[in-house]
Amino acid sequence: MGAVATDGTLALNAAIIHEFRIPEDVIDAAVEQERQEVERRERAYRNGRLPERTEGRFAILVDDGLATGASMLAAVRAVRPYTRKVMVAIPVAAQSTCNDFRHEVDHVICARIPWPFYSVGSFYRNFEQTTDAEVCSLLSKASALNEMVKS
């Protein structure tokens, strides 16, 4: 029904909320729970590292695919005020979602827009959740490479 970005930016899917008649108190509780989870992940993944500065830069936001696009929309809204341009790049997306993003960002790359679109996971052989340990390891390696490049 929606997503929350690191800075608290919220993207709710009004159509889903309306279709399933989700009460406001249920939405509020879900938002609070997700904000806490985002804060937990932010602390765990950053491991004390500061966020990269994005002011005036061209941000490329990547995801494994877009169904409703709520998570990506929250990310776009969170970085948009601080970047020069925003691109969304995804390997697979629903046609309508891909089209919606053309109005939200400067560039959209949807490598594959299948019809019918059932789910993102149906386009992967292995669609297992990435663990916190894997994310932390990859971010640590990326940070080390970034430091090497800067020096």
Image (cartoon, grey):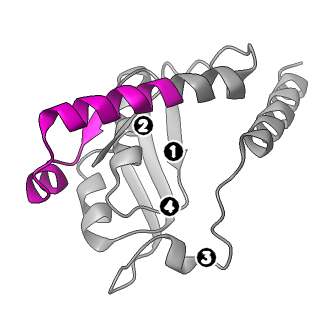
**Secondary structure category for the residue under label 3:** loop
- Give how far apart the Cα atoms at labels 2 and 1 are: 8 Å
Which-is-in-front pick, marks 4 and 3?
3
Q: Which residue is mark 3?
A: 124
Looking at the image, is mark 2 or mark 1 earlier in the sequence? 1
Magenta stretch: includes residue 116 = no
Looking at the image, is mark 2 or mark 4 earlier in the sequence? 2
Could you tell me if residue 84 is visible in this image? no
Quadrant of res 139: top right
Of residues 151 and 6, the one nearer the viewer is 6
Three-letter residue code for mark 4: Ile
Circle 2/circle 3 CB separation < 8 Å: no
Which-is-in-front pick, marks 2 and 3?
3
**Secondary structure category for the residue under label 1:** strand
Residues in magenta, as a range: 9-37
Looking at the image, is mark 1 or mark 4 earlier in the sequence? 1
Of residues 74 and 12, the one nearer the viewer is 12
Three-letter residue code for mark 1: Leu
Q: Which mark is residue 61?
A: 1
Q: How many marks?
A: 4
Q: Which residue is mark 4?
A: 90
- Give how far apart the Cα atoms at labels 2 and 3 are: 23 Å
Could you tell me residue 17's position as x and y percent?
15, 50
Circle 2/circle 1 CB separation < 8 Å: yes
Q: Which mark is residue 75?
A: 2
Identity of the residue furthest to the bottom in this view:
115
Q: Would you call the spot at circle 1 few (<14 residues within 10 Å), some (14-19), or many (20 or more)? A: some
Three-letter residue code for mark 3: Tyr
Image: 137 above or below 111: above
Quadrant of res 138: top right
